[in-house]
Amino acid sequence: MLFRIIFAVGGGVAGTLLASRLSENPNVFVLLLEAGDQAPWYFHSRYLEGFFESRDISYEWNVNLSVHNDQHERWSYWRVLGGSCVACESFYDFPPASEWDAWTDERRLSDVWSWSQISDAFASSPIADDVDTKSLEQQQVNIEEEEKRRMQMVMSLKKRANVASRSLTLFSVQVVTIDQMTDKLRNAAILEGYKVVDEITRKEKIAFSSAFYWRKSDGGSASVLDYLTREVQSRFNLHILTGARATKVIFDMDGKATGVSYVYDGRPQRVLVNREVILSAGVVGSPHLLLLSGIGPEEQLTQFNVTLIRPLAAVGEQLAGPLTTTIEYRTNQDCKSGANVSFTDWIMRTFCDNLKRFEFLKRVCDRRDGSLTKWPTLTASLSASAVNKNSNTDLYVTFAPFCSQSKWSLSVQISLLSSYRSGSVRLQSSDASQAPLIEIQSREWFIDLLTKAALRVHELLKTRSFATLGIELSEWQRAKCGGEASESFFSCLVLKSPAWLFPSHTSSCAMGNMVANSVVDKYLRVHGVKRLRVVDASVLPPVASVRGALSSVLMLAEKAASIIRRGDQGDA
């Protein structure tokens, strides 16, 4: 019996889900390599998580905003099995369908990646879908015709079909508990003539909507690790190796990917495959690994004495990130300090009120007042200029109410829908242990657009219905930028305020049919390289980054699993 061996590099959201899906076929042996370790069970606590922000679990990329004046920012990504969403609140929203289709048309990907082709894959990630029983039955028939030593696989396959049908119901897209402030904001929007929807839609028109989260069916926080059930982890054909950092893809004399080199426990290792290698190392890790392996701009590879395998000018060169800013407001609306909290929150509040005086506990308790307590309950798709409620949207706004000093406050994040920051991921050394050089445009380049957007939202909150809530700019923001709410004031806030909600970046291994401006084709195969694919956020379009890339990455992994399982798109 010959196993088809697939090697997946990167155990983040895409890699973990992909490994669980591909290993459903007992004839496919899946090796999943993850540079980080497994997170402890208490890592899922949004309070105790603060104890583990070290380089053992969290990795910060130093990102250059300007090579001339040494401006930079930090991007934090979890280096742990399950990726950056292993301990996040899993905010879930669809990208705009019209802009997605415009991207597929431009890059000639419509037959595989148009909205009509992928919409079911979006739904199947968080919502139960039907098991392909016909496919499973056919696999059983084929297996039963094999020799006796393969009969055990039949029982395994039947067991997996039953488990799969149950596991598909584990997740759903849910609205978080609505608090009084959210209700008041919704009512104000209705009084101002805006439509309010309570389901995930294409959101092509101006409207307000409930905020949605990817959760377990019982309402608990979901993680991609939930796909790794006991049954999945016990599969003989799935092996997950944590603490192993990939250094290079191995190729034969014909330029075909045959394996991966990696470092484990301080020792260099290598593994060979007979099927294909899949990179799921993320928007920074995947292009970096391609460059180290000899796939990328020829001039750059020559500069660092990397043996050229395949010249691809687009590797790492179309990095995209959302243009966002966060404005905080206070209101005159009363709230209780325990408003909209769970029993765990109540325990933590009591704990902090009594023990926060101890310095070593202060870090944990401060998280209650930090960004993790400010997840959105309401979103809005707006126009930056038009008053017409039927015009197309160019702003995406999230509203996160939180209780501060017995009054409701608002954290409002504003994102541009059609403008993005662009940058690159390039080699800084041929040594795989050295971080790549990451550059991206500063928000300062887009100050006029972001200021206009912030003013538009501020004007909305000053309309009659919203004004009854006593919404005013927070005192600390006034102190930071001084003066009243003017254009110069908001320009100052745009540059100084964080954009904390969506650390989503895409497109560093862009998908397309043209070798000149893309890295992978519509089947996610690296152009001109056999047995090598990329399946992670780096292949997604910029529009996927604006509302958080989680929904798009889950969709991508489901779609990729479907493509690979067909078995007819393995070579470039």
Image (tube, helix red, strand yellow):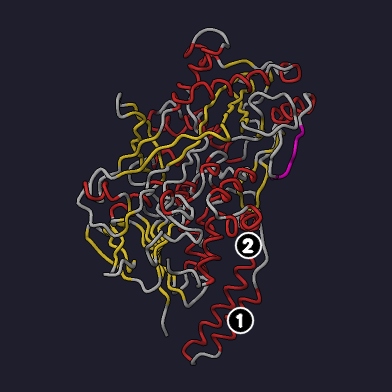
Q: If the image is split into quadrants, where does the C terminus sit?
A: bottom left
Q: If the image is split into quadrants, where does the N terminus sit?
A: bottom left
Above or below: residue 23 compared with residue 452: below
Per the rendering, the mark at residue 138 is 1
Which type of secondary structure does the marked residue at label 1 adopt? helix
Q: Residue at x 34, y 26 (%)?
A: 71
Above or below: residue 7 compared with residue 186: below
Using residue 469 as the reference point, say whether residue 33 is left or right of it.
left
Per the rendering, the mark at residue 494 is none
Residue of label 2? 168
Can you give x and y, in whole percent of width and height, for residue 165 in the image? 64, 68
Per the rendered image, the range of residues in magenta is: 195-201
- Mark 2 or mark 1, which has the lower sequence index? 1
Above or below: residue 234 compared with residue 511: below
Which type of secondary structure does the marked residue at label 2 adopt? loop
Can you give x and y, in whole percent of width and height, for residue 97 in the image? 64, 46
Q: Residue at x 59, y 27 (%)?
A: 412
- Depth check, mark 2 against mark 1: the one in front is 1
Q: Residues within 10 Å of mark 2 (few under 14, many from 20)?
A: some
Using residue 333 as the reference point, say whether residue 279 is left or right of it.
left
CB-based contact (under 8 Å), mark 2 and mark 1? no
- In front of the other: 132 or 445: 445
Above or below: residue 305 compared with residue 479: below
The amino acid type of the residue labelled 1 equals Gln
Can you give x and y, in whole percent of width and height, for residue 60 in the image? 36, 39
- In front of the other: 197 or 313: 313
Asked if the magenta segment contains residue 515, the reply would be no
- In front of the other: 295 or 458: 295
- In front of the other: 312 or 31: 312
Can residue 429 be spotted in the picture? yes
The Cα–Cα distance between marks 2 and 1, rounded to whole angstroms, is 21 Å
Dominant SS of magenta comes to loop
